[in-house]
Image (tube, rainbow, N blue to C red):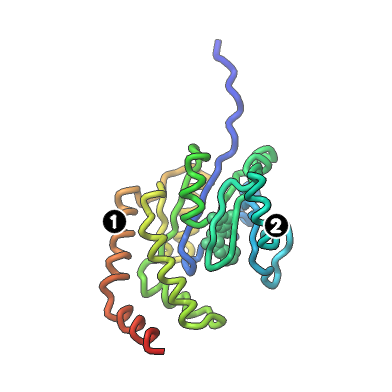
Amino acid sequence: MTTPQAPKSPAVIIVSAPSGTGKTTLNRRLTTMHPEVQVSVSYTTRKKRQGEEEGVHYHFVTNKHFHELIKQGQMLEYAEVFGTLYGTPVGEIQRLQAAGKIALLEIDVQGWRQAREKLPGAKAIFILPPTVEALWQRLEGRATEAKDVRWRRLMTARNEISSGNLYDHFIVNHNLETAYAELEAIVIKGERSKIGHQEGLRLCQQLLTEFDDSPWLHKLSRELADN
Ligand code: 5GP
């Protein structure tokens, strides 16, 4: 006679990526194509952007409220990203799992560093840009942001990429279609990423070398310093 087993909880997926890597587009497509995947709704102190809704994209709170939530132990993890606080509510994963959903946490590297001991079964995916130059060009495409803001985002990306060892699965976003197919294979089919841990770390190292050795980046840094 076989022993009855407790039903397996739906998976918990972490997706982190430096800003400008296409993470939001990939995740939106995944949740649209597969409604069984739902993004965990975080708290944030940033202002609502056009088209964002309270309780759908984020819970928009004041700094004071956010700090109260931390004090009350209501944050599974939290981090300051570009001067704004973001945090995952305790209980959000259980809420999604109880509804039979795969919980998708779009959190930054600092957040995953804090949460990973609390979420031992989670699958952590890191989305990488193909090159630093491609990342810079994508940030340049955001015409709303000044060059020094883009530069700060680029340096944050460098920092994040140096923590690639916290992730098990790596996707390089060369092309949206291929990157999406890989994300879908990992989250929906439960496959491993095509790029294994060692290869992922090698790619991170390659990007870090590009950050440190590119003549165009040195030139850009001098230009910004002179302004
Ligand atoms: P955005 O303001 O563009 O929605 O998000 C900016 C950054 O904050 C992204 O890198 C995103 O992954 C990160 N982020 C969003 N929610 C959370 C959260 O709950 N915790 C952490 N640690 N980072 C978050």
**Side (left or right) of 51 relative to 128:** right
Q: Secondary structure at mark 2?
A: helix
Give the image location of residue 23, x and y in percent.
51, 62
**Side (left or right) of 43 relative to 24:** right
Q: Earlier in the sequence, mark 2 or mark 1?
A: 2
Residue most extreme to the bottom: 227
Residue, x 56% and y 81% (percent of image)?
Answer: 144
**Side (left or right) of 21 relative to 197:** right
Residue, x 68% and y 52% (percent of image)?
Answer: 68
Q: Quadrant of residue 219?
A: bottom left
Residue that numbered label 1 is attached to: 202
Q: Mark 2 packing: few (<14 Cα in 10 Å), some, or many (20+)?
A: some
Q: Quadrant of residue 178?
A: bottom left
Q: Mark 1 packing: few (<14 Cα in 10 Å), some, or many (20+)?
A: few
Q: Is mark 1 within 8 Å of ligand 1?
A: no
Residue that numbered label 2 is attached to: 65
**Mark 2 touching mark 1, by CB under 8 A?**
no
Single out the mark in the foreground, 2 or 1: 2
